[in-house]
Image (cartoon, grey):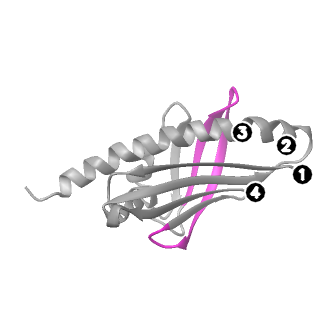
Amino acid sequence: MPEIHATSSAVIAAPPPIVYGIIADYCQGHPSILPPKYFQNLQLEEGGVGAGTRISFQMRRFGSVRRFHAQVTEPEPGRQLREIYPDTGMATTFTVDPEDAGQSSRVTIATRYTKAGLAGWVERWLAPGFLRGVYAAELRELGVQARARTSRSAPA
């Protein structure tokens, strides 16, 4: 079975706790970084922040809309959050590392999964480029949200 892997990174001009807080908050933070061109109808099924959260959403990809269900874990709380999609065997990991002595954050979004048959071979060629585009848009939105939160928390 072909393994499909896609990753994208960006430096966000905000400290890791702020950035990670946005990613881990599925009530307000995470929904605010999802580009509507790709994501629709994020539903919170359980929890809301970090590990133990369960969500579902629709994703527009390759000309169709598909519903995904995910369980959130935190392999490294405060640094790494993972969405596991039990129906597909996919996993998407968000990793936040400090940059510039903790004044900025390097955020990496990575997805890994396998898919059998001809569809797997086709996705192996198409999905990484598509997902990198999705993640680039998501990282841009994360930057906007993180800058807004950083400016709100700055002393006057």
* Residue for badge 1: 1
Q: Residue furthest top?
A: 63
Of residues 5 and 88, the one nearer the viewer is 5
Q: Find out whether the residues at labels 1 and 4 contact each other: C-beta distance under 8 Å.
A: no
> Mark 1 or mark 4: which is in front?
1
The type of residue carrying mark 2 is Gly
Q: In 3D space, how far apart are the residues under numbered discs 4 and 2 (Cα atoms)?
A: 13 Å
Span highlighted in magenta in the image: 54-79
Question: What residue do we see at 42% from left, 51% from top?
Answer: 11
The type of residue carrying mark 3 is Ala
Q: Secondary structure at mark 3?
A: helix
The type of residue carrying mark 4 is Gly
Q: Find out whether the residues at labels 2 and 3 contact each other: C-beta distance under 8 Å.
A: no
Q: Secondary structure at mark 4?
A: loop
* Main secondary structure found in the magenta portion: strand
Image side of residue 111 versus residue 117, left or right: left
Image side of residue 17 versus residue 64, left or right: left
* Residue for badge 3: 127
* Residue for badge 4: 89
Q: Is residue 64 visible?
A: yes
Q: Secondary structure at mark 1?
A: loop
The type of residue carrying mark 1 is Met
